[in-house]
Image (tube, helix red, strand yellow):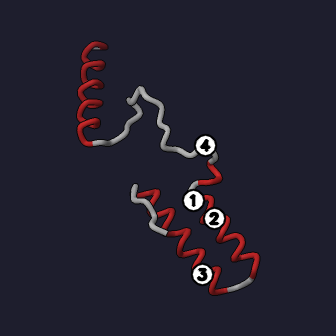
Amino acid sequence: MAQENDELAQELKGLLGQTGLKSALDDEPQDDAPDNPLETDFFKAMNAFRAARTSGDREAMEAAERHLQEVVRGELTGEACTE
């Protein structure tokens, strides 16, 4: 049974590799993450939203909120945000 599971895991890993998808089965460390998580698009957008909220500028707040929503949506769908 354990051998069948290992074979199935290797088959799945091969299929994921063919499609270019990453998985928890990957043995290699993922180095696409930035060294500093505060430099991610999410944290940049969140900090911009906080700054706009602190400034009290309603238009800047709305724009920053929309951008933050786009970044979060991109994270959830796997699509990179362009701005």
Q: Are marks 1 and 3 in contact (CB under 8 Å)?
A: no
Q: Which residue is mark 3?
A: 62
Give the amino acid at mark 3: Glu
Marked residue nearer the N-terminal end (4 or 1): 4
Q: Amino acid at mark 2?
A: Met
Q: Position of residue 38 (x, y in %)?
A: 65, 53
Can you say whether 57 is above or below 39 in the image? below
* Image vertical order of residue 64 relative to residue 26, above or below: below
- Tell me how far mark 4 sits from mark 3, CA to CA: 30 Å
For the residues marked 2 and 3, what is the alpha-carbon distance in whole angstroms?
13 Å
Residue at 53% over, 44% down = 33
Pointer 2 and pointer 1: residues touching (CB < 8 Å)? yes
Name the residue: 60% across, 81% down: 62
Numbered disc in front, either 4 or 1 = 4
| Disc with the residue nearer the chain's start (4 vs 3) | 4
Residue beneath the point at 56% across and 46% down? 34
Amino acid carrying label 4: it is Asp
**Element class at badge 2:** helix
The quarter of the picture where the N terminus appears is: top left
> What separation in Å lies between label 2 and label 4 (alpha carbons)?
18 Å
Whichever of labels 2 and 3 marks the residue nearer the N terminus, that label is 2
Q: Quickly name the residue at label 2.
A: 46
- Marks 2 and 1, Cα distance to the nearest angstrom? 6 Å
Q: Of residues 27 and 35, which is closer to you in this image?
A: 35
Write down the residue under mark 4: 35
Separation (CA) of disc 4 from disc 1 = 14 Å
Between circles 2 and 4, the one closer to the viewer is 4
Front residue (pair 42, 83): 83
Binning the other alpha carbons within 10 Å of mark 4 as few (below 14), some (14 to 19) or many (20 upward) gives few
- The residue under label 1 is 42
Judging from the image, what secondary structure is the residue with disc 3 in? helix
Tell me whether the residue at label 2 lies in contact with that at label 4, contact meaning CB atoms closer than 8 angstroms: no
